[in-house]
Amino acid sequence: MLGEFDVIRDYFSDVGAFRDDVAVGVGDDGAVISPSPQNQLVAVTDTLVESIHFPRTSPARSVGHRSIAVNLSDMTAMAARPAWATLNISLPSSDRDWLADFTAGFGELAVAHRVQLIGGDTVRGPLVVTVQLLGEVAPEHYVLRSGAQPGDAVYVTGTLGDAAAGLRAMTRGDVHGWLVDRFLYPEPRVSLSAGIGRYCSAAIDVSDGFGKDLERVLQASGVGACVDLEALPLSAHLARNFNDDESRYLAISGGDDYEICMTVPPHAGPALEEFCQSIECPVTRVGIVESAPGLRFKLGGQAISVNVHGHDHFVTDE
């Protein structure tokens, strides 16, 4: 059986991209990095717990991929560039095949976005993965949840509800298919970060459900919004498997999409759409920010009542 330091040496000492700004990485008491003096540091972190954030049947490669993908999505919403990561992992056993697949999933995405693993910790216990991601952003370009203004348009990338549908399929025993892959291997919109910094007044990554996450932006900004249900971007795969009402419910409340919801001033909308087209990132205008607090919906031009749910670790929907 592998010991703790064997695991670190064999699987975590050389993960991700190689960066010139890392003087000391994995293997010492701490890492030494050299951030760009003209930029500010951005730190994000997420913890994934087996049977809470992903099913026990999830492949190790998916667990590794998701553990960094969810952090890359947060970093993108802040309009920052990812650079360095730490990984703390609790493992029930030091299975070589599982570790190899996990680090492959983590490392492939890290390399793709020039992220170097610079440290972390391992311990024996239930499967829990915590990643902290550090990145950089110019002081004038970071974007918060609190900047939305009345009259701004609400945009969202990609399609919504697919991952939640994939998770439903997994609970039925399905292990393959496009919707399942949307849950297992989310693709964060990292290339969008520059556009968010230029054109957006507020942004958030869609992790707990589009409705819940948009509400967080509205509350932080002290505004409201109206969303057109007919404008929500839904994939053909979702539409083939669910009726309109079910599809919209999954889109609004499903979660795990890791798309980006943005508010954009009226003059910047065309530029954002052009930027998204240039990086091949689908984006859809779905609503407008209003001065009256609260999130409202319309369907066919008429106001409609929608109960917004979403994931909250300390609240259970009755």
Image (spheres, grey):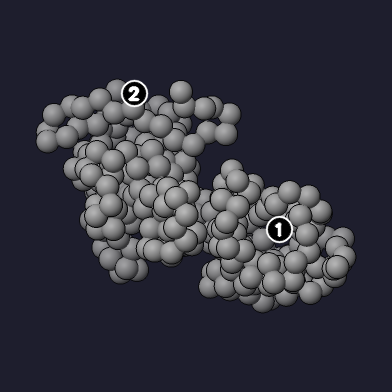
Q: Secondary structure at mark 2?
A: loop
The amino acid marked with disc number 2 is Pro
Image quadrant where residue 8 sits: bottom right
**Residue visible at 59% across and 59% down in the picture:** 63
Is residue 292 visible in this depiction of the protein? yes
Q: Considering depth in this image, is 211 or 245 the residue closer to the camera?
A: 245
Residue 300 sits in quarter: top left
Q: Quick check: 171 left or right of 151?
A: right
Is residue 298 shown above or below 48?
above
Residue 23 placement (x, y as % from top left):
77, 71
Q: Residue at x 26, y 63 (%)?
A: 274
Q: Which mark is residue 183?
A: none
Question: Label 2, on which residue?
Answer: 293
Disc 2 versus disc 1: distance between alpha carbons? 39 Å
Tag 2 and tag 1, C-beta contact below 8 Å: no
User: Residue 66, image x and y in percent?
Assistant: 55, 58
Spot the residue most to the front.
173
Residue type indicated by callout 1: Leu
Above or below, 19 against 44 in this view is: below
Q: Residue at x 80, y 68 (%)?
A: 7
What residue is rendered at 25% in x and 25% in y? Answer: 305
> In x, y percent, where is residue 179?
38, 58
Task: Work out whether residue 310 or residue 223 is closer to the camera in this orientation and state it.
Answer: 310
Which is nearer the N-term, disc 2 or disc 1?
1
What number is the disc on residue 87?
A: 1
